[in-house]
Image (spheres, rainbow, N blue to C red):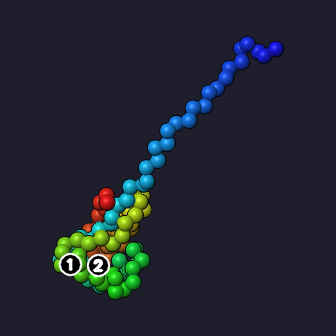
């Protein structure tokens, strides 16, 4: 005979609400002091661009004020910004790097 004190659990299926992770573009901002060559190195090393692409992005930032270096999930974008800022500061340059939701 089944124990009348037995409890039962009902597992309900929840409607799935899986959103794709939001993406952020990481941008460099222009300033009057950071050397062009330093910016080209940053774009190559932190955003894995070849030298020609890095040069084009740097010149776009120089002429237009800002430019996108890459698009990443939020945590990766935040790490890129922190790494670029730390690298620029240790070299004594005022280079600014920001992230913006796509
Ligand atoms: N404007 C800087 C110069 O003339 C070069 C530069 C480019 C600085 C891009 C920052 O994100 C930057 N030396």
Image quarter of residue 76: bottom left
Q: Give the CA separation, mark 2 to mark 1.
A: 9 Å
Q: Which residue is mark 1?
A: 62
Q: Nearer the viewer, residue 69 or 2?
A: 2
Packing grade of label 1 (10 A; few <14, some 14-19, many >=20) is: some
The N terminus sits in image quarter: top right
Image quarter of residue 91: bottom left
Image quarter of residue 58: bottom left
Going from N to C along the chain, the mark reached first, 2 or 1, is: 2
In the rendered image, residue 60, in percent from the top left (x then y), is placed at: 23, 78
Packing grade of label 2 (10 A; few <14, some 14-19, many >=20) is: many
Q: Is mark 1 within 8 Å of ligand 1?
A: yes
Q: Judge depth for marks 2 and 1 and give the one in front.
A: 2
What residue occupies the far bottom of the structure in this picture? 52
Would residue 73 be seen by someone viewing this image from the given angle? yes
Q: Residue at x 73, y 13 (%)?
A: 4
Q: Is mark 2 within 8 Å of ligand 1?
A: no
Q: Nearer the viewer, residue 62 or 52?
A: 52
Q: Nearer the viewer, residue 6 or 94?
A: 6
In this rendering, position of residue 97 left or right of residue 45: left
Q: Residue at x 35, y 61 (%)?
A: 24
Q: Is residue 3 above or below residue 67?
A: above
What residue occupies the far right of the structure in this picture? 1
Q: Residue at x 33, y 66 (%)?
A: 26
Q: Is residue 50 above or below residue 82?
A: below
Q: Is residue 69 above or below residue 38?
A: above
Describe the element under mark 2 as helix, strand or loop.
helix
Q: Which residue is mark 2?
A: 57
In the rendered image, residue 15, in percent from the top left (x then y), is placed at: 49, 38
In the rendered image, residue 65, in percent from the top left (x then y), is placed at: 19, 72
Q: Is there CB contact under 8 Å for labels 2 and 1? A: no
* Quadrant of the rendered image holding ligand 1: bottom left
């Amino acid at each position: 005979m089944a124990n009348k004190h037995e409890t039962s659990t009902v597992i309900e299926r929840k409607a799935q609400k899986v959103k794709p992770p939001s993406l952020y573009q990481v941008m460099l901002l222009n300033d009057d002091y950071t050397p062009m060559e330093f910016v080209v190195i940053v774009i190559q090393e932190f955003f894995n661009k070849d030298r020609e692409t890095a040069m084009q992005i740097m010149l776009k930032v120089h002429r237009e004020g800002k430019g996108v270096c890459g698009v990443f999930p939020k945590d990766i974008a935040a790490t890129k910004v922190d790494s670029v800022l730390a690298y620029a500061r240790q070299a004594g340059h005022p280079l600014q790097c920001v992230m913006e939701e796509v």
